[in-house]
Image (spheres, helix red, strand yellow):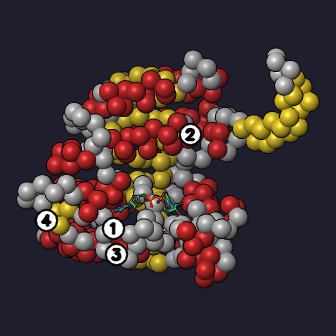
Amino acid sequence: MSTSSPYRIAVIKGDGIGPEIVSSAMKVLSSAAARFGFGVEYNEVLAGGCAIDACGVPLPSYTLDACRASDAVLLGAVGGPKWDGIEPSRRPERALLGLRSGLGLYANLRPALLFPELASASPLKNAGAIDILIVRELTGGIYFGENGSYESSDLLADGTVKGKVAYDTEAYSEGEIRRIVKQAFEFARGRGRKLTLVDKANVLASSRLWREVASSVASDYPDVALDFLYVDNCTMQLIGRPSSFDVIVTSNMFGDIISDEAGMITGSIGMLPSASLGAPETPGMYEPIHGSAPDIAGTGKANPLATILSAAMMLRWSLGEKAAADAIEDAVKKVVADGYRTPDIASGADGEISVDTDGMTEAVLKALG
Ligand code: NAD
């Protein structure tokens, strides 16, 4: 699909390596746009530490307004040691929560793909072909449930006074579960037609509701095989048989944990993109899974591929430019197959071509044609 008016992309470069990797992704996006006959218009806005420096808050209201008025948001990363001393509610990372809740982004998609040429970077001995899509619920569950603390003079069985008690609540509504599970079924339908619901239904009432809702949604997707896995078992199976997974759908906290595990087994934090999506009319937000890597900011060592692949996800899921998305992903596969390596994915093997951030970007642009 292409339109006559350009797509409006809100760009948040952020902190640390953010400006370097987002600039790379913008070059690739613009090149894909020229090749496939559509326009992109960038609106650069501040969030994170640079926004604190410029206007005293991590997420200025004009940034959220600009994101709301866009077709999609491209984000680098926020945070860094410069702002570590600031009290938690005003730190750069609060911008992420504000963007997610402000845009209603309830579904977080994290593909974990092991490029065959980078298999030696995986900590697994025989990783096989890993291509998993984790669909994590992003705006509900225990991170957003009722929480608090109180003093208790009650005694434990051994006579110890309880003292301070703190609690967090995991609560999910049928509606919250249904919308994300439906989305996961749709993704599974477009991939390997296998969906795994990861939960803790042997212990948690909220997990049993997830199973109930997923089972009822499954009747609309007879072509997709649904199975269930307890989260503790899932952490083992991701290591034992990673290539057997296709799409995983799960709650906010379980998704937080297993998506990091799945990322780790692909061996390269600089290669993994992500998308956060809400209702069809709200803009999706696309960003690499890694942080602002202050240790390598300004050195040219940052791998831009996770951000470039995030831009490809944006083309596919928010802008409907599937051919351009495929072309970028193919270009990335080609440069990796051709041996181009930033330091984070270099193994020293024969045939590798060492490049910096700009060199990797140029290689992708060339492969894109
Ligand atoms: P990090 O992901 O920034 O870095 C971890 C390690 O991976 C570092 O050694 C870094 O050099 C390396 N690395 C990360 N991205 C890379 C890339 N593209 N190419 C090559 N190497 C790369 O995690 P951290 O060090 O724990 O966090 C640094 C800052 O980022 C903190 O302030 C943290 O709060 C913030 N953070 C932000 C986000 C986000 O904006 N979404 C996510 C995670 C962490």
Say what amino acid the circle numbered 2 marks.
Met
Q: Residue lying farthest left?
A: 351
> Residue 246: x, y in percent?
32, 34
Front tag of 3 and 1: 3
What numbered label is drawn on residue 299? Answer: 3
Q: What residue lies at 51% left-to-right and 43% top-to-bottom? A: 256
Q: Which residue is mark 1?
A: 302
Residue at screen point 68% across, 61% down? 88
Task: Characterize the local packing of mark 3: few (<14), some (14-19) or many (20 or more) Cα atoms within 10 angstroms.
Answer: few
Q: Quadrant of residue 46?
A: bottom right
Measuring from the top left, give residue 331's x and y in whole percent: 18, 61
| Residue 163 appears in the rendering | yes
Distance from the alpha carbon under mark 4 to that under mark 2: 39 Å
Separation (CA) of disc 2 from disc 3: 34 Å
Can you tell me whether the CB of the residue at mark 1 lies under 8 Å from the nearest atom of ligand 1? yes
Q: Which secondary structure lies at badge 4?
A: strand
Marks 4, 2: nearer the viewer: 4
Distance between mark 3 and mark 4 Cα atoms: 18 Å
Residue under label 2? 253
Where in the image, quadrant-wise, is ligand 1 located?
bottom left
Q: Compared to 110, does 55 lie above or below? A: below
Q: Dot 3: what SS?
A: loop
Q: Secondary structure at mark 1?
A: loop
Choose between 264 and 172: the one closer to the eye. 264
At which x and y percent is residue 215?
49, 22
